[in-house]
Every structure is written in structure tokens, then in C-alpha cells.
Amino acid sequence: MIIYKDKISTIEYDKKSKNITYNERGFAKKELLIAQLKAVMEFSKTNRVISTIADFRRLQGSFKNIFEYLNTEYYPALKSQGIKCKAFIISEDIISTYLTNELVKDLKKQGIDAAIFSNTASAGTWVSQHNDSIAKA
């Protein structure tokens, strides 16, 4: 089910797996990225979210300008709602790789497991394994 859409993003929720998938494209604009994050935080208040997959392969430009918001608002909000893991799918672009590695470090500091992948299948498998282990716990 699509929970948010704008000119650079489509965000979907899978009720069965409790996963949100971000499909990003185009130039990263701070105001659009913040609007997406706010929509997901609001959605997570009434729907359980235990994992997210962010596909950044078609996202252009830097998203460093939202790190403060991610670390002070978004990640703590999702953590309090029960998120356990986040997978990133990225291209081999040096800027995306560096920034995403920084996000992974930030997430782990907040107690959210995170990893980087180059394709959807690997990211999906990793998230499914985490979700399965949560369901069995």
C-alpha cells in the first residue's frame, strides 16, 4: 500500500511484513525529504513498522543536510515505535556510499541494525531474516 508519494519518492508499506520501502529518484531536496520523513513518522503512530528499505540508487545529490533531523527526530521516533532494522540500496557513487555509511553508523548508535546493499533481492533477504527473528522472539 502506498503511504506517501511526491515527485522524488514513493513510499510503500507491507502490512504483513511491517516493512516500509522508500523508492527515491531525482534530486534530493531537503524540504521533500523532510516531508517524507514526517509522513512516515505519522504513519508509524498507528501502524507497526519493524523495518525499512531505502532504495537510493536513483537519488541524486547529497542528503547530508537532513542528518540532524534524522538523528534527533526521525530515528528516535521510529525506534520508540519499534523499528529494528534498516536496509539501504545504493549505487556505487562515492558520495552516496560515504553518506550511507555515515547513516549506518548513526543508526547503530541508536540501537537500530542497518546494512548497505547493491540490489533489492539482497536487501529484502536481510530484512526478512531480521523480521523472522523478531517474530520468533
Image: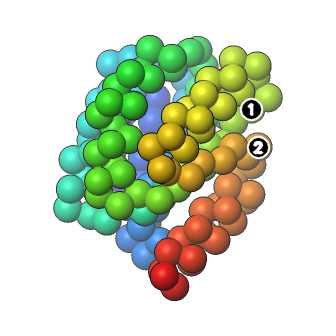
Q: Nearer the viewer, residue 82 or 44?
A: 82
SS at badge 2? loop
Q: Is residue 45 left or right of residue 92?
A: left
Give the image location of residue 21, x and y in percent: 49, 51
Q: Quadrant of residue 55?
A: top right
Q: Is residue 102 above or below residue 114?
A: above
SS at badge 1? loop
> Residue 91, labelled with which disc?
1
Q: Amino acid at mark 1?
A: Ser
Q: Residue furthest bottom?
A: 136
* Residue, disc 2: 118
Q: Residues within 10 Å of mark 2 (few under 14, many from 20)?
A: some
Q: Is residue 76 above or below residue 135?
A: above
Q: Residue at x 60, y 62 (%)?
A: 127
Estimate the spatial distance between the alpha carbons at disc 1 and disc 2, rounded to whole Å.
Answer: 6 Å
Give the image location of residue 81, x and y in percent: 29, 57
Q: Residues within 10 Å of mark 1 (few under 14, many from 20)?
A: some
Give yes or no for contact between labels 1 and 2 (Cβ–Cβ under 8 Å): yes
Q: Is residue 18 left or right of residue 58?
A: left
Q: Residue at x 69, y 23 (%)?
A: 98
Q: Amino acid at mark 2?
A: Ser
Give the image location of residue 103, x and y in percent: 56, 32
Q: Which tag, 1 or 2, sits closer to the chain's start?
A: 1
Q: Residue at x 74, y 32 (%)?
A: 91
Q: Nearer the viewer, residue 94 or 13?
A: 94
Give the image location of residue 69, x and y in percent: 34, 25
* Quarter of the image with the N terminus in it: bottom left
